[in-house]
Image (cartoon, helix red, strand yellow):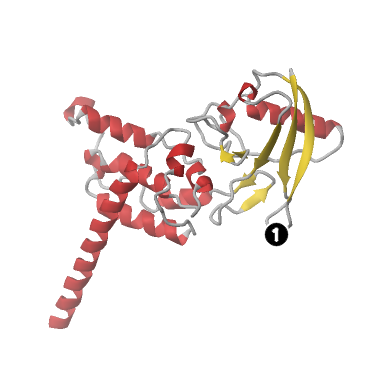
Amino acid sequence: MADYRINVWRQDQLQQQGHFEQYLVENISADMSFLEMLDVLNEKLISDDLIPVAFDHDCREGICGACSLVINGIPHGKECGTTTCQLYMRHFKAESEITIEPFRAKAFPLIKDLIVDRSSLDRVLQSGGYVSVNTGAAADANNVLIAKHTADDAFTAATCIGCGACVAVCRNASSMLFVAAKTSQLALLPQGQPERLERSLNMVKQMQLEGFGNCSNHYECEAACPKNIPASYIAQLNRDFLNASMSSKEYEHQTHCKSLEE
């Protein structure tokens, strides 16, 4: 059992000024998860008639991505390939001081304390992260043969949980790794080919509308990703976006020429 000094960002709403408050949490087991430690803190605050710390969580199994916190300056903490809910207090030195902040990005407006609104990622996904063509009934798995390495790459991209850690760690608050993963998981498979270029064009445009920055190849997103998604998918997205942009301009040029002839 150990005690920890916790510096927590407190802010009632976006329009108000936020600040850090320090709390002492006592008798914390090394086997407690980080969120369980915050539960202990909130129980103490409630028993003292104080307002508990607002933080987001859901599955607590490293699946949903809701537990998005910046811990000691690193999204999800210092452990690689780990979500906040799968981070345990044994990863911290006993009697140490821990600083907890929300994800900070223009596209993630703060709601309260450690909770931010990440619905911008949902809107990016809604702009093209799906297959809309009529494919009929589901075919048997063996009817469409896919190479093992292609299936593995698609699955790796599909492991993205949309937590936003890549945005929080990026100096430009870019969501390129998120968009690249969501486009690649479909672009690598036959079902996603018909809309491949259109998908990349629409999702990148929506990303820019939401206020996310551009990628400048610092690779911090890859390091912070709790699912270890490689930044190589960004290169694929850039190629698809470039091809889509050129195809779109060519189509607009042909349409304009045709209208002039008429």
Mark 1: which amino acid? Gln
- In this view, the residue in front, 146 or 217, is 217
Q: Is 245 situated left or right of 259 in this image?
A: right
Q: Residue at x 20, y 76 (%)?
A: 256
Q: Is 100 situated left or right of 124 in this image?
A: right
- In this view, the residue in front, 1 or 261, is 1
x and y, in percent, of residue 196 in the image: 26, 49
Q: Residues within 10 Å of mark 1 (few under 14, many from 20)?
A: few
Work out which quarter of the rendered image holds the N terminus and state it: top right
Asked where in the image residue 204 lies, by quadrant, the reply is bottom left
Residue 132 visible: no
Asked if residue 236 is positioned above or below residue 39 in the image, the reply reads below
- In this view, the residue in front, 87 or 141, is 87
Q: Residue at x 17, y 29 (%)?
A: 143
Asked where in the image residue 35 lies, by quadrant, the reply is top right
x and y, in percent, of residue 136 in the image: 23, 39
x and y, in percent, of residue 119 in the image: 52, 49
Asked if residue 163 is positioned above or below residue 254 in the image, the reply reads above
Q: Is 162 situated left or right of 252 in this image?
A: right
Q: Which residue is mark 1?
A: 15
